[in-house]
Amino acid sequence: MDNKNLNNNLETINNDIKNITISNNILSASNGNACANSENLVFPIDKYDILFTITRNKDFSREGLNNVICKMFTIRELYLVNLDTLSVLLGNMGIEKLNIFHIEIGKTFTNVRSEATGGGADTIYMEINPEEFINYLNTDSNFLNHNNNSLYILRGGTYLDIKNLFAFIENCNVNVGRGGSQRSHMLSPLDIRLTSYLMAMFNFNYNAIKHYNTFNNIGKYTYLAHKDMSFKSFRKVFPEDTKEPE
């Protein structure tokens, strides 16, 4: 996605965000979104998708900037994931719950929510547009708890788009980073979470994960956060609570 299209999308979000109303608990089956059992649901992930998990460094504060760490995986080509099978494999690993948010840049479709029916982990798959996802981040006071059991899939975007989407969480100013602690060379809980989800999605097939991983071929535009004025646009959503970075 080029900068012009990205800026157009962000402008639309800024114009419409105040008119969005959704349930405070978007994961609830009673929130009015289209909802169904999985019925052997198969959802696609493709070369246009970024799969990622995030975690916070410490408790959030309305004062100053709060840091969040992101781990990403990009895929080489189309791969289909069966939601019921994923649920069973996650359960076999001892994972009790997984929320999958599939966010597509530039889309305004109605949210779709499906639950796995094959037993195993309580697995929810949701397609959600960027506007409502941003609103969810700032209206659900339990988001940070839900995040501990969540995988995000961003379609048609880059690392910069991830930073934009998560510029606010629970009305707190947020910066999404890659992590640089003294223990960054050690396997972290965030690494383990993303790796475990990928193992289940690829049926514990090491060669499949190795094949689909684009780590050695990914373009810099996808994973670098180039300075871009669009990063500030999401910060206009709640201007009374925040200040522009100097």
Image: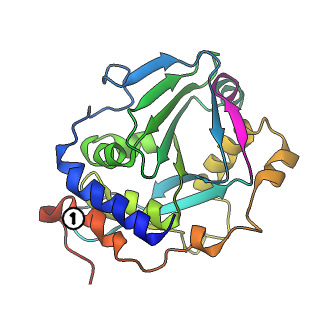
Identify the residue position indicated by label 1 in the image. Answer: 236
Up the image or down, 214 lies above or below 127; here it is below
Up the image or down, 134 lies above or below 124; here it is below
Let me know if residue 9 is in the magenta part: no
User: Percent position (x, y) of residue 8?
Assistant: 35, 62
Disc 1 crowd rating (10 Å Cα; few below 14, some 14-19, many 20+) is: some
Residue positioned 65% across, 18% down in the render: 40
In this orientation, does residue 42 appear? yes
Q: Quadrant of residue 119?
A: top right
User: Percent position (x, y) of residue 100?
Assistant: 52, 37
Amino acid type of the residue tagged 1 in the rendering? Lys
Residue positioned 18% across, 44% down in the render: 19
User: Percent position (x, y) of residue 63?
Assistant: 21, 67
Judged from this view, the residue extending furthest toward the bottom is 246
Residue positioned 54% across, 50% down in the render: 155
Q: How is the image coloured?
A: rainbow
Q: Quadrant of residue 13?
A: bottom left
Give the magenta-colored segment's residue range: 77-86
User: Percent position (x, y) of residue 209?
Assistant: 79, 49
Residue positioned 47% across, 33% down in the render: 126
